[in-house]
Image: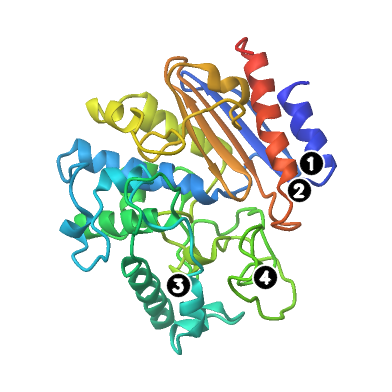
Amino acid sequence: MSPDEVLAAAVASGDPPAAQCCVLLDGRVVHESAHGCALASVFDVASVTKVAATTSALARLVAEGAVALDDSVRRFLPGAAFDASLRALLGHRSGLPAWRPLFVRVVADPVAGACFSRDAAPPAAWARARTVLMQSVLSTPAPTPGRREYSDLGFLALGAVIEAVTATRLDRFCEAQLFRGRDLGFVDLATPASWLDGAHVLATGTTRPRAPAPGQEGLFEVPSQQAAPDPGRVDDDNAYAMGGVAGHAGLFTTARALAEHAHATWIEDALGATRAAFLARDPADGPPRALGWDVPTPGSSAGALGRGARVFGHLGYTGCSLWVDLDRRLVVTLLTNRTLPGRERVEGIRALRPAFHDAVAARLGAG
């Protein structure tokens, strides 16, 4: 099957409701398509934010000498309960837990809780929500340093480090230094207007907070509420409590804009020697990773694209992915909103990703 046939069949089944892809080879678009949406439609890319924004921003700061990978997080965030290096946080071996429903504290706060109502919350509520959420992150202990555990909390902390170093909020720094006016950016929920105004944005859920994902059952309660899609408002509730601007999630983009950003930042070698430092395998007990980036392993979602010697990428919970092959100067993006019908539906995207990437590899003669 061709890449389009793979995606068209999945969307026709409703799992996912929509999909969009882009393949860049040496910076040129060699394939792109949209199914259940348009090429200009915008998706919430969830944890792809970790590499497209946070990792890319830190790589820029390291290249400029503003920070060093072995700096302690406490150099920038002295109140942190954990004493991990930036390298350990990027490698997901700080000892911080994978995830916690920190937004529950925001919901319970008498000021910040207004952000989780269906009514528009005032700026003071959003400011308080960011404070409460980050205080929760920085007060979290890290009992198992050195062991690999993929952690949203670690990237929330890294986002705060970037803001401390640059004295600029993460979304504004990334827009000025990385995104270059592309259809790529965070959405500030405290501001009525955004760059998404007039765009077709794919919804990813219907409740706020979202229902627990598989494995999160019993950790928090979702109040009874009328289902109502809210496109343009970040799917992840911890990122939502940060006003949509967080180090682990919050980016919205198109498949082409994401691919062009990855090419410009990581293939064109604007980072110099810093790129090699970030893409080297990071030693730790647990699954192999680079700094910020995932690397393909047997049976991974990269499929046949993962056979290259220097391939790296990242997945997003909403059903998105980004894979880069440095040697072939290849970037492949796949965006979906697989969570809209329900977060419990995971088998479809697990099958779709490698099938799509296998089809892309076959088309490029790499299968």
On the image, numbered disc 3 is attached to which residue? 190
- Left or right: 233, with 111 as reference point: right
Residue closest to the eye, 72 or 191? 72
Q: Earlier in the sequence, mark 3 or mark 2?
A: 2
Label 1 – label 3 distance at C-alpha: 33 Å
Identity of the residue drawn at 54% across and 61% down: 236
Dot 3 crowding, Cα within 10 Å, few <14, some 14–19, many 20+:
some
Image vertical order of residue 211 relative to residue 38, above or below: below
Q: Secondary structure at mark 1?
A: helix
Residue 54 image position (x, y, % from top left): 36, 48
Q: Amino acid at mark 1?
A: Val
Dot 1 crowding, Cα within 10 Å, few <14, some 14–19, many 20+:
some
In the picture, residue 212 is in which quadrant? Answer: bottom right
Q: Earlier in the sequence, mark 2 or mark 1?
A: 1
Label 3 – label 2 distance at C-alpha: 29 Å
Q: Residue furthest right?
A: 13
Residue closest to the eye, 331 or 158? 158
Marks 3 and 4 close (CB-CB < 8 Å): no
Residue 323 image position (x, y, % from top left): 52, 30
Dot 4 crowding, Cα within 10 Å, few <14, some 14–19, many 20+:
some
